[in-house]
Each structure stands twice: as C-alpha cells, then as structure tokens.
Image: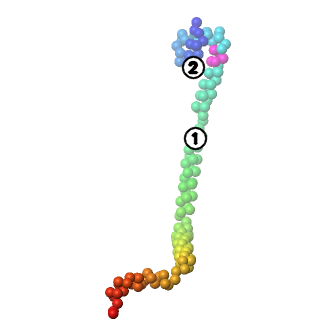
C-alpha cells in the first residue's frame, strides 16, 4: 500500500494518464480508501480543466483583418489631409509669410523702444565718432599749425 505523500506526488501524472498500469491501479485503490486524496484529486482535475479551457479560447478569425483595416484607414486620412492643394500651396506659404512679417514688426518695435529708452544724446555719440578730440598727441600731430 502506498502512503499519501507518494500519491500526492504522482496525482498530476495520474490525471494526465502518464503513469504505468501498476501505479494507476495502486493510486485508484488508495483513492477508494482515502477521502483526503480523493478530494485533492477532484480539485486538481477541476483546476487542470479550467486551465485547458483557457488555453483553447476561440479567436475571432476576422480580428486581424479589422485591425489592419483600421490602421490603413488612419493612414489614408493622414494622406488625404496632406494632399489638399489649398492647404499645401496657398495657406501654408501664407501662414509662414505672416509669421515672418509679425516677427520683423516685433523686432522693429523692440528696437525703437530700447533706442528711445536709452536717452542717448548727440554728445555721447559724437565722442565715438570723433576720437581725435580725446587724444591730444594726435591732435597735435595732425594740426596744420
């Protein structure tokens, strides 16, 4: 007679019919006498059946076709939006030109704003234009006297 520990180790093989004929007879005799092992065997059979059902799920044969068609329709929609000649040849250059003009206008406004706020007088700017008055040696050498 086989004890419960040896039976528990071989239960999965017994359920899947992977034991020898001798072992099968011994396990069946033990299961007829041992209620605990019988309950464990029933639970294992239920678990394995549930796993096998999950493995054999029916897949929709048209699923891949629907996915590919959805991808292609998205691609077509993108291509159609770029193929519109009004957008591509008229609106796009007009928008770029408008943005460039606005940028130039803002640059001019900023330049005049900072020029007006610096309050530079002609005396400050004339110093840079006439450096000879600042250098006495050059004035002495270049004078006509």
Split into 4 quadrants, where in the image is the C terminus? bottom left
Name the spot of residue 53 as percent of width and height, x first: 61, 30
Main SS of the magenta part reads: helix
Name the spot of residue 44 as percent of width and height, x first: 62, 21
User: Taking 134 as reference, is 39 left or right?
Assistant: right
The kind of secondary structure element at disc 2 is helix
Q: Residue at x 54, y 72 (%)?
A: 103
Q: Is residue 142 magenta?
A: no
Q: Residue at x 43, y 81 (%)?
A: 128
Is the residue marked by circle 2 packed among few (<14), some (14-19), or many (20+) residues within 10 Å? some
Residue 77 visible at all: yes
Residue 94 visible at all: no
Q: Residue at x 57, y 9 (%)?
A: 2
Q: Residue furthest top?
A: 1
Q: Residue at x 58, y 41 (%)?
A: 61
Split into 4 quadrants, where in the image is the N terminus? top right
Q: Is label 1 or label 2 in front? A: 2
State the residue position of label 1: 61
Sequence-wise, the earlier of marks 1 and 2 is 2
Q: Are marks 1 and 2 in contact (CB under 8 Å)?
A: no
Depth check, front residue: 12 or 79 = 12
The kind of secondary structure element at disc 1 is loop
Compared to 48, does 66 lie above or below? below
The dot on residue 12 is: 2
Quadrant housing residue 114: bottom right
Compared to 36, does 74 lie above or below? below
Chain part drawn in magenta: 37-41
What is the CA distance from the residue labelled 1 to the residue labelled 2? 34 Å
Depth check, front residue: 83 or 108 = 108
Quadrant housing residue 105: bottom right
User: Taking 127 as reference, is 99 left or right?
Assistant: right
């Amino acid at each position: 007679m086989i004890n419960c520990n040896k039976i528990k180790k071989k239960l999965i093989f017994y359920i899947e019919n992977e034991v020898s004929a001798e072992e099968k007879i011994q396990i069946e005799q033990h299961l007829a006498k041992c209620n605990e092992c019988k309950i464990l065997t029933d639970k294992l059979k239920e678990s394995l059946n549930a796993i096998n059902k999950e493995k054999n799920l029916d897949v929709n044969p048209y699923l891949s076709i629907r996915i590919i068609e959805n991808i292609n329709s998205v691609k077509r929609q993108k291509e159609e939006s770029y193929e519109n000649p009004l957008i591509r040849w008229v609106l796009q250059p007009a928008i770029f030109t408008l943005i460039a003009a606005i940028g130039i206008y803002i640059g001019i406004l900023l330049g005049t704003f900072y020029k007006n706020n610096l309050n530079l007088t002609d005396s400050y700017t004339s110093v840079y234009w006439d450096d000879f008055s600042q250098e006495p040696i050059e004035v002495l050498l270049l004078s006509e006297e």
